[in-house]
Each structure stands twice: as C-alpha cells, then as structure tokens.
Image (cartoon, helix red, strand yellow):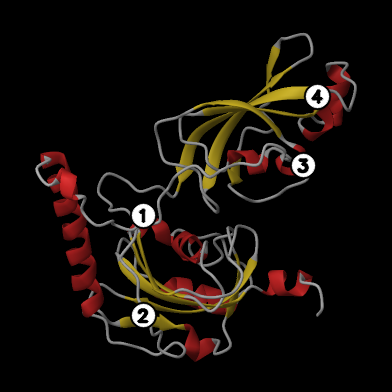
Amino acid sequence: MIFKKKNPNNVGNPTWLKLMVGALLIYMGYQQFTLNKTPEKIDNPPAQTSDLSTKEETAPEIAPNLLGIKFVGDITGTGNVATCGQKAKMRLQGILPSGASAELPAASQQVVVGMQDKARAWLPAITGMRVGGVREIILPAHAILSAQDIAHYKIVTNTQLNLRLFLDELTPSVGNHDFMPLAHDVKTGSGAIASCGQTALVKFVIWGEDGKRLYSSNTDAPEGVELKLGASQLFYGLDWGILGMRENGARTLVLPPAYFAGAEISDNKNMKKIRQLIPAEKTLAVDINLVSLPTINASAPAK
C-alpha cells in the first residue's frame, strides 16, 4: 500500500504514531539500500517517481463464475495469501450426491497458484485463499473426479459436486527472520497491465547488498527477456514484482532471500547463467522495465 498523509485528527493517537515510525524506518532502510547502487541505464531514464509502497498481499475480488466455478463460501485462514506463482500444498474433499465426503488423494499434491490446467479445473479458485483456510466451490463431476472415480461412485458425469479446498502450505513464504518484499514504482506505464499466466518481455538489473551489479539483461538480451508470469522461470520475486505493472513501466524491488526461489530449468542456458549469479540467502534489489506483453498484443484486434 502507499503510505498516506497523517490525519490531523489522529495526532495524539499513540497507535498511529507507532505505525508512522514503522513506515519511516522501512523507508529509511530502502533509501540506504538503493543509494549504494551504481546507476545503470535500462531504457530512457523515467521522469516521474511515486511513493514507496509494499504490494499488499490481500485477497482479490473473485468473479462468481470464474471459468465455470461457482463459489459457495470460505473459512478464512490466518496465514499468507496465495498469489500467482507460489507453490501450494492442498488437500481436496469432494461432497458426493449422497452427502458423504470423499478425500481425493490423487489431487492432493503441490500445485502452482494462478496456473490453468484442464485436469485441475479448480486451480484458479486457490488465488486469494489464506494458509489454513478452506474454500468450497461447485464444479461438474468430470472436472473433479477421474473417470474411474465417477464409475466407482456411480455419478452422472455432468452432476454438479461441491469441492472443499484446504490450503495447508505456501512456498515461498516470508519467514520470521525475513522482511516483507518492497516494490517502488519509478515510472507508471501507459499500456496493458501484467497479470498471471501472461508472457512478459522485460529488461532487468540485479543488484547485490553492496550496491554492485550482479546481472544486467542488457548484456545477454538487449531486446529483453520473455517470461511466463507465475512460472518462476528465473525466480519467484521477479514474477511477483512484474504483476500489476503496465507496459512501458519501471519498478524497483527489494526482495528477501525466500523470493529468489525458482523453477527447475532444463535447457535455457541464459536462465541457468542468471540463476548461478544469484547468491544464496541474500537480500537483493532488482530494477525492472516492462517492455511489452506479447500475448496481450498478439490477441488484440487489428486496427
């Protein structure tokens, strides 16, 4: 959230003062970290700046019929909010037409939040849940159960079933010794907004704690690097930082060590090289320039 100006009516409120002092300490720490960096030009220097902000981890508004999913209700958890690209450990419980419940061990595995999978039509419903929470949705039986299970329970394929999603764990998550990641919008773009599952063309620079440049995409990919948002092809924090940006926008991130977790990379030599340059258990800064969203532009109607 962006820190707002103090309300004159709350001047004497000690709780308000504590919040303001905390906000000031975060801002001062960020300034000290970024002042150590040696400036590098990614594109044209942005002309406008905005206040320091933390991307607030709150549950988003969910469309009532997202991809055919009907939402029944939630038992809100007390942990972190599930966001695009995190790995979620889930348990699933189906409610049969008889009213009996059935555990679905085949579906109880680690999945990626925000991704779409025809075999797991319930995946989009995880977004916005909190760890320890339960969400109940309604989907056709064939979108929940295997053909073998449908035959075993003698269910008509298109029967609407209730499904309960139990969110047990999220990774990466910020531990007790890590600070929350920070995002500072240096330039607000004017194009489309980056969202989960899209392909983004970005330029970026990674900085060490001592202000030294660890990597610049200008060297290996002057036109930019394409990333599928949510897949953590390089590291989770990069995808996290790009989400919500507009095309032609610029943003600086300060990320805790947990946010440098990434997916397994098999054949992309450039991405392997970048991952090898990231030191373990270090807090790093990343400058991002969102060049374009190719998937959005490709699907746009011709003028």
In the rendered image, the residue lying farthest to the front is 9
Contact? badges 2 and 1 (CB < 8 Å): no
The answer to whether 147 appears left or right of 250 in the picture is right
Say which quadrant the N terminus sits in. bottom left
**Upstream in the sequence, badge 1 or badge 3?**
1
| Marking on residue 214 | 2
The disc label shown at residue 160, or none = 4
Q: Which mark is residue 1?
A: 1
Q: Residue at x 53, y 79 (%)?
A: 248
From the image, tell me which residue sits under label 3.
119
Q: Mark 1 and 4 residues: CB-CB less than 8 Å, in contact?
A: no
Tell whether label 4 touches label 3 (CB within 8 Å): no
Gap between marks 3 and 4 measured at Cα: 16 Å
**Mark 3 / mark 2, whichever is N-terminal:** 3
| CA neighbours of label 4 inside 10 A, class few (<14), some (14 to 19), many (20+) | some
Question: Would you place residue 56 above or below residue 170 in this image?
Answer: below
In the image, residue 255 above or below residue 137: below
Question: Is residue 14 toward the left or the right of residue 151 in the image?
Answer: left
Numbered circles on residues, count: 4
Distance, label 2 to label 1, CA atoms, is 29 Å
Please give left or right for residue 282 compared with residue 47 in the image. Answer: left
Asked if the residue under mark 2 is in contact with the one under mark 3, i.e. CB atoms within 8 Å, the reply is no
Q: Secondary structure at mark 1?
A: loop
Residue 225: horizontal and vertical position, in percent? 57, 79
Front: mark 1 or 4 = 1
